[in-house]
Amino acid sequence: MKIIFTSQLYRQSQLHLVYPKEFIGTIPIEHRTTSAAAELGNLKIEELWFEGVCLLNSCFNANATLAMTLQCDSFCWVMNFVSDGDLVVKSNAEDIELKLQKGWYHTFYCSALNTDLMVNGPAEVFTICLTQRFIRKLLGKQVMSFNFEGGGPEPFTLVTTDEYYDGRFKVLIKEMIQADQPDYIRRIFLEAKILELLSLQLERLESKPLSPGNFSKEDISRLEEAKNLVAQNLQTPCSLIELARKTGLNDFKLKKGFKELFGHTVFGYLSELRMNSAYQLLKEGKTVSEVSEMVGYKNAHHFTSAFKKRYNFLPSRVGKMMILVFSGYAFSAFYGCFWD
C-alpha cells in the first residue's frame, strides 16, 4: 500500500509513503516521521501503523494554496479531522468535493483512493486509514451495505461529516497523538480509541434527524426511483449497494432518506410488497410453493415464516378461507332463490 503526495504546480516535489500490505509490520507498531519541502511551503507527517490501521498527523506550513494528489492502491476507510486551517478534498474518480475547516471531520470509503487535496495556508490534519479487513471484521457484512466480498470497485462514498472540535472527539484525538506507552500497550490503547471514535461517529450519524425538507428535488426524485426499482424487482431485488449505484445516491442518504420519505426501510418496503402480492396470489388459487417463488423467496419455509409473522396465520389457510367465503355466497344464493 502507498500514498503519494504530489505538488500539482511542482511535479518534481513528490513524497511517496509506502506501507506493507494490511499495514502488517515486524514489530507491534511501526513509526516514521517524513518531511518534504516545496516552493509554496513545507510538509511534515508523523506516521505510525499496525495491522489494519495507519495514523498520520500531517502539518502543512503553506504560505499559499498548496494542491497535491493523494493516491492509495487499495480499499480505504478514511477519517480526516482538521485541527487547524482548512482544506478541500476532491475525488478524481467521482464528481465529489468535500470542504473542511478547523474543528470539522469527514469519513468516507472507496475501493482505491485518488483525490486532490488543496490546503489553504497553514493547516494540521489528523488522519485514520483503516483497511478492508479491519472494517469488515468490526462492522460485518450485514451492517455495511457495500459488498466487501465481491471484489468489485466501490464508489467514493461519504459516510458522515460534522463538527467535532469540542467534546469527546477532541479528547480522543489528543490522547491518540500524545500516547507514549510502550508499543505493545500503545497498540491496544490506540485501537480502543479508534473503535470509540468510530462508534461515536456512527452513533451520531444514526441519531441525526432527517426530514423531507432536507432533501433536494433531485434527491427526492432519486429516492422515488429507488422505490420503483424495489417494486419492480420482487423476485430478484437489488442489494443496497446496487440500488445506490443505480440511483446515484450514497449509502447514508438511501437508507435514512428512504425511511424518512416512505416510512419503511428499503427491505421493510420490499417485505411489505412481497406479502401483499403473496396474499393476492394465494387468493387467486396459487399454491404456497408457487407463490413463494413468484415473490422472490428461494425457500418456501422462509416464506411461510414471514407470511405468518405478517398476517398471524399460515399462507395455506388463505385458499381454505376463500372456499369458505365462496361456499357462504353459494349458500346465500341458493336459499335466496328458494324463498323467492
Image (cartoon, rainbow, N blue to C red):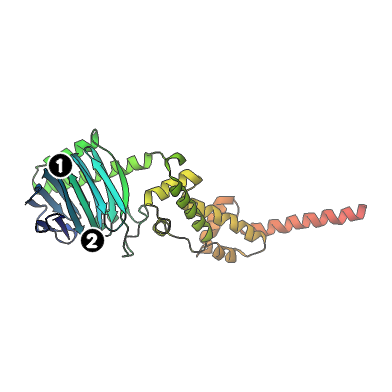
Viewer-nearest residue: 243 or 274: 243
Q: What is the number of the mark on residue 225?
A: none
Q: Is residue 80 left or right of residue 184?
A: right
Which quarter of the figure has residue 132?
Answer: bottom left
| Residue 165 seen in the current view | yes
Q: Dot 2: few (<14), some (14–19), or many (≥20) neighbours within 10 Å?
A: some
Q: Give coordinates of residue 72: x percent, y percent.
A: 20, 59
Going by the numbered disc 1, the residue's amino acid type is Gly
User: Image point 48% across, 44% down: which residue?
Assistant: 261
Residue at 31% from the left image edge and 45% from the top image edge = 160
Q: Residue tagged by mark 2?
A: 74
Q: Is residue 321 above or below residue 176?
A: below
Q: Is residue 149 left or right of residue 82?
A: right
Question: Which is in the foreground here, disc 2 or disc 1?
Answer: 1
Residue 130 at least partly seen: no
Q: Position of residue 175 (x, y in %)?
A: 16, 39
- Nearer-the-camera pick, 303 or 88: 88
Image x and y of residue 298, in percent: 50, 65
Quarter residue 279 falls in: bottom right
Q: Amino acid at mark 2?
A: Ser
Q: Is residue 273 left or right of residue 97?
A: right
Residue picked out by circle 1: 121
